[in-house]
Image (cartoon, rainbow, N blue to C red):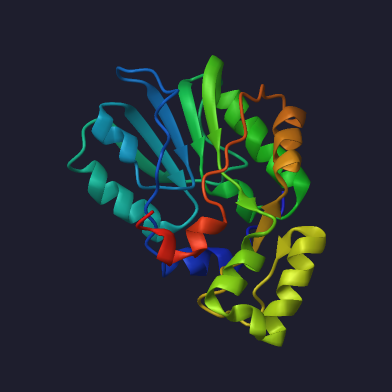
Amino acid sequence: MTELPHEIVEHYRSTDEGQEIVRRHLPDGPQRVLDIGKATGVLAADGHQVTLFDIVPEHVAAARRLAGRTPGMTASLADARSLPVPDRSFDAALRLGPLYHLTDRADRLTALREARRAVRDGGWIFVAAISRFASLFDGLARGFLFDPEFRRIVRTDLASGRHRNEGDHSQWFTTSYFHHPDELRQECLDAGLSVLDVVGVEGLAGWLPQLAGR
């Protein structure tokens, strides 16, 4: 198991991220939800029993503060590839961050298999990934593409999916893997999951603020 690059942890130490969870498939009533790597615990407010794990200490500290006033919620430090939970002990798992920060395919499959191990048969696993074309769209929308260093990053992203911001530019994101949609589906299948659907959540319009009113 490879160690998570330090720049990823540092990126999220300085970034406060919210999240949107598609609730359409999660059954009503208290479900046992494993929230891995996006430690905000928003489903706890819906009455679910949420167990959070994150590799960033600041995220865990914030989640613990939230847990102090949110019944049925806990938060701990852990790596998405090795979770300290029993087999089939959850009804659903959320992997809305870890997958795109694991640049090696073997590590991504390990993380997916860990979610599969932790969730009961017939349960739900929600996975988020970043599009192979994200840096191209972002560079065009915000003008970064006119910087030769960013163009080099985009060329690498498009060719290999491996995004590295070696200059540590605050607006150029951090070490990540950018999936092609078909590749994401195949990795989930290779990890032993049954794939219901791959859904595009944010497309080019997300980078065009003048379309917000429409």
Residue extending farthest top: 121
Image x and y of residue 125, in percent: 54, 29
Task: Identify which residue, 204 or 86, lies in the foreground.
Answer: 204
- Vertical relation: 89 (above or below) 71: above
Residue 58 left/right relative to 96: left
Task: Identify which residue, 181 or 31, lies in the foreground.
Answer: 181
Image x and y of residue 66, in percent: 24, 47
Image x and y of residue 103, in percent: 71, 55
Quadrant of the image occupied by residue 186: top right
Residue extending farthest front: 214
Task: Identify which residue, 108 or 180, lies in the foreground.
Answer: 180
Q: Residue at x 75, y 78 (%)?
A: 152
Image x and y of residue 65, in percent: 24, 50
Q: How many marks?
A: 0
Q: Residue at x 39, y 30 (%)?
A: 23
Residue 73 left/right relative to 1: left
- Vertical relation: 169 (above or below) 205: below
- Vertical relation: 67 (above or below) 141: above
Q: Residue at x 73, y 28 (%)?
A: 189
- Vertical relation: 57 (above or below) 139: above
